[in-house]
Image (cartoon, rainbow, N blue to C red):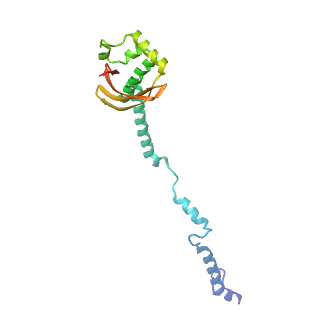
Amino acid sequence: MAKAAGGGPNKPSGKGAASRNTSRGAASSKKPASGEAGSSDADVDAAVVDEAPPNWKNAWPFFVAAGVVALVVLGIVLSNISRPPEERVSDDALVQYAINDLYTAKNGPDYAEYRANTCDADLDKPGFPAEAQFVAENQASLDQNGRIEIPEITDLVVDGDRATAKVHWHYKNKSEDKQVVETTVVRENGEWKVCSS
């Protein structure tokens, strides 16, 4: 009888049934070895499901850090803007500006600028030049030697309201004749002035 040999539709039996179940089970349970191409779609789907979507709540430490950095930068900017310009520059730079302005006044020749960058002790000395003498001497030097050039200022030391530096200078037309002058600069009423001693 066909029914006894093949088994019923709900009860597989015999070799035929076993081979059908084995082949179906082998196809569904066999996974490719790691490193082999063609991993199953089920593995990819599982990986996607395991990763949670990004959430803005997870980023709050970064927002806090960015806010702190922004406040610090804003504080520095506001501090620099609210301070007067002369307080934003270091004393070293102000001393160099005073020296440069004095030599620029000689190049002018600009007597008012020269006096503005000279200390009170020098202005009060009996040998301080009058305007006519200053202009005549510096104009003659300018015509003969060219402008005074300062390639560098070295050994600058600021100690309170007093500074010393070495000014390296030469005339434009005599660049081989380099001069080095020990220079003293003092702070008077908040402004740096070049002084002979």
Vertical position of residue 40 compared to residue 17: above or below: above
Q: Residue at x 44, y 41 (%)?
A: 66
* Quarter where residue 84 is shown: top left
Quarter of the rendering occupied by the N terminus = bottom right
Q: Is residue 43 left or right of residue 75?
A: right
Q: Is residue 6 left or right of residue 144?
A: right
Quarter of the rendering occupied by the C terminus = top left
x and y percentages locating residue 16 in the rendered image: 66, 85
- The answer to whether residue 191 is seen in the rendering is no
x and y percentages locating residue 32 in the rendered image: 59, 72
Q: Residue at x 33, y 24 (%)?
A: 185
- The answer to whether residue 153 is seen in the rendering is yes
x and y percentages locating residue 47 in the rendered image: 54, 61
x and y percentages locating residue 86 in the rendered image: 38, 24
Q: Nearer the viewer, residue 79 or 177?
A: 177
Q: Nearer the viewer, residue 4 or 55?
A: 55
Residue farthest along the bottom direction in this orientation: 1
Vertical position of residue 70 compared to residue 163: above or below: below
* Quarter where residue 105 is shown: top left
Q: Residue at x 38, y 23 (%)?
A: 98
Residue farthest along the right direction in this orientation: 2
Please tell me how many numbered marks the rendered image carries.
0
